[in-house]
Image (spheres, helix red, strand yellow):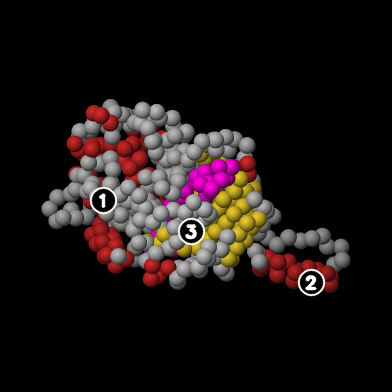
């Protein structure tokens, strides 16, 4: 399955010079390309949702290293120099009021926060004075190692990629629009004309592939007093 | 175990200063600083709206913040307009199921954040198209099983009246992949074990 996916991906990329950009898989040439591969800084997806097991809690998930084949998953690893920062804005100015910072160093996940950040925006300081919780990164094939302290429950390790999409059909359809605009795009997938509708059923491009996940659950009360908030995630490299 | 190196650094520093300066106050090691490599709020935004962008465009988007918008509204509107024109819709009069025209939709999407309402159940897409409350039962967080691709396609192509869609629109509002290939767990960490 992996070979099939990558053969298809390379076909698309080779023909167009475009990068695979599904959901946000390998959409960041600085941190992951088809030729160089994805990295632990390459965010594939971000989720933020009410806990399925406790309506008083909220859950944040960041996935990286998209399209990891099962045979490559045991070797997939986090990076000592990459931090994942969940940003929470309580007053709708799109500036983070609280951050939750996750770092993985030598196989140990430590999550700090939530705490008001020392600095906002593209540069961050690791908030080592904030309350925190640690646990070992879960090895491929092992029962999840879960850390619980200071209100937070945390996990880091390989998981099935929860994202699903018929990415190649999407690409063919949008390439048709690009071709109509006179842009450099791949030839039609079927060799003659671009698709103008999805197949039914579609084919899930991400079936059978894995990611590395960081999952954080904590009480909603730790996310500020506002009923509504906005959030986003960043991967950040140590300077 | 966390910050082992800080602890070690702190210990060695304490040992040094203990020998030389009894008046020394507790000295904290300088915390590490980090710089953004990638960012994400809503799903598929960079995918769709920077589809035709070059590496510099994608990197620029990924190394932006939502303050003031992660991208120019006009750039996202350009993509929406042209995708709709390609399938025979009139982008100048198009409004989506949320009642938003392309300019407004683009202005919302260029601020790449997930909106959440803590008092209401999470859902990215509307379960009832006749009862749409933005930020409440539409675009309220993102759950693992939410079909974000279909939601995005509906916003882009369905118009504001699903009963009035033509055949082309109907072929484009769902990718017909309706769920993940593995079931999610009801207990932490929720995501399925790897393949």
Q: Chain of mark 3?
A: A
Residue B18 position within the rendered picture, expressed as x and y whole percent measured from the top left: 83, 69
Residue carrying label 2: B16
B51 over B83 or under it: above or below: below
Residue carrying label 1: A202
Residue at image point 52% right, 53% down: B187
Residue lying at the far right in this picture: please name it.
Answer: B22
Separation of disc 1 and disc 2 at Cα?
65 Å
Mark closest to the chain's N terminus, 1 or 3: 1
Residue B128 position within the rendered picture, expressed as x and y whole percent measured from the top left: 37, 32
Residue A144 position within the rendered picture, expressed as x and y whole percent measured from the top left: 53, 63
Report the side of B180 relative to B114 (left or right): left
Residue at image point 24% right, 28% down: B164
Q: Chain of mark 2?
A: B
The question of residue A13 being in magenta is answered with: no
Q: Which of the two residues, B149 or B8, is positioned nearer the viewer here?
A: B149
The question of residue A58 being in magenta is answered with: yes
Asked if marks 1 and 3 fall on the same chain, the answer is yes
Label 1 element class: loop
Report the side of B143 relative to B4 (left or right): left
Q: Which of the two residues, A17 or B111, is positioned nearer the viewer here?
A: B111
Count of marks, rendered view: 3
Asked if marks 1 and 2 fall on the same chain, the answer is no
Residue at image point 47% right, 68% down: A141
Q: In the rendered structure, are the residues bearing label 2 and label 3 in contact, judged by CB atoms less than 8 Å apart?
A: no
Asked if marks 2 and 3 fall on the same chain, the answer is no
Residue carrying label 3: A213
Nearest to viewer (mark 1 / mark 3): 1
Residue A134 position within the rendered picture, expressed as x and y whole percent measured from the top left: 62, 61
The residue stretch that appears in magenta: A37-66
Label 3 element class: strand
Q: If the image is split into quadrants, where does the N terminus of chain A sit?
A: bottom left
């Amino acid at each position: 399955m992996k070979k099939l996916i990558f053969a298809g991906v390379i076909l698309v990329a080779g023909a167009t010079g475009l990068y695979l950009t599904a959901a946000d898989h390998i959409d960041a040439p600085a941190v992951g390309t088809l030729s160089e591969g994805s990295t632990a800084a390459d965010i594939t997806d971000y989720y933020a949702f009410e806990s399925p097991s406790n309506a008083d809690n909220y859950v944040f998930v960041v996935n990286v290293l998209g399209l990891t084949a099962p045979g490559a998953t045991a070797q997939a690893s986090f990076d000592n120099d990459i931090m994942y920062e969940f940003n929470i804005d309580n007053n709708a100015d799109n500036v983070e009021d609280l951050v939750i910072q996750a770092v993985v160093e030598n196989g140990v996940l430590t999550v700090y926060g939530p705490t008001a950040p020392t600095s906002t925006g593209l540069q961050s300081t690791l908030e080592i004075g904030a309350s925190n919780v640690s646990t070992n990164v879960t090895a491929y094939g092992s029962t999840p190692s879960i850390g619980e302290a200071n209100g937070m429950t945390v996990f880091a390790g390989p998981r099935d990629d929860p994202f699903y999409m018929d990415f190649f059909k999407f690409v063919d359809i949008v390439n048709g629009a690009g071709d109509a605009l006179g842009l450099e795009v791949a030839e039609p997938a079927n060799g003659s004309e671009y698709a103008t509708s999805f197949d039914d059923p579609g084919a899930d491009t991400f079936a059978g592939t894995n990611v590395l996940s960081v999952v954080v659950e904590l009480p909603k009360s730790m996310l500020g007093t506002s009923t509504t908030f906005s959030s986003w995630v960043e991967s950040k490299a140590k300077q | 175990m966390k910050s082992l190196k800080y602890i070690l650094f702190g210990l060695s520093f304490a040992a040094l200063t203990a020998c030389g300066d009894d008046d020394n106050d507790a000295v904290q090691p300088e915390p590490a600083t980090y710089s953004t490599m990638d960012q994400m709020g809503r799903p598929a935004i960079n995918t769709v709206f920077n589809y035709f962008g070059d590496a510099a465009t994608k990197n620029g988007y990924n190394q932006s913040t939502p303050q003031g918008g992660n991208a120019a509204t006009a750039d996202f509107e350009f993509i929406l307009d042209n995708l709709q024109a390609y399938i025979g819709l009139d982008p100048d009069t198009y409004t989506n199921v949320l009642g938003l025209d392309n300019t407004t939709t683009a202005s919302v999407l260029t601020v790449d954040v997930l909106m959440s309402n803590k008092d209401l159940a999470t859902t990215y897409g509307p379960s009832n198209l006749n009862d749409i409350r933005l930020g409440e039962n539409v675009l309220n967080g993102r759950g693992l099983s939410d079909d974000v691709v279909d939601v995005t396609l509906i916003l882009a192509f369905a118009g504001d009246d699903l009963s009035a869609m033509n055949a082309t629109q109907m072929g484009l509002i769902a990718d017909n992949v309706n769920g993940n290939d593995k079931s999610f767990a009801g207990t932490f960490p929720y995501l399925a074990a790897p393949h």
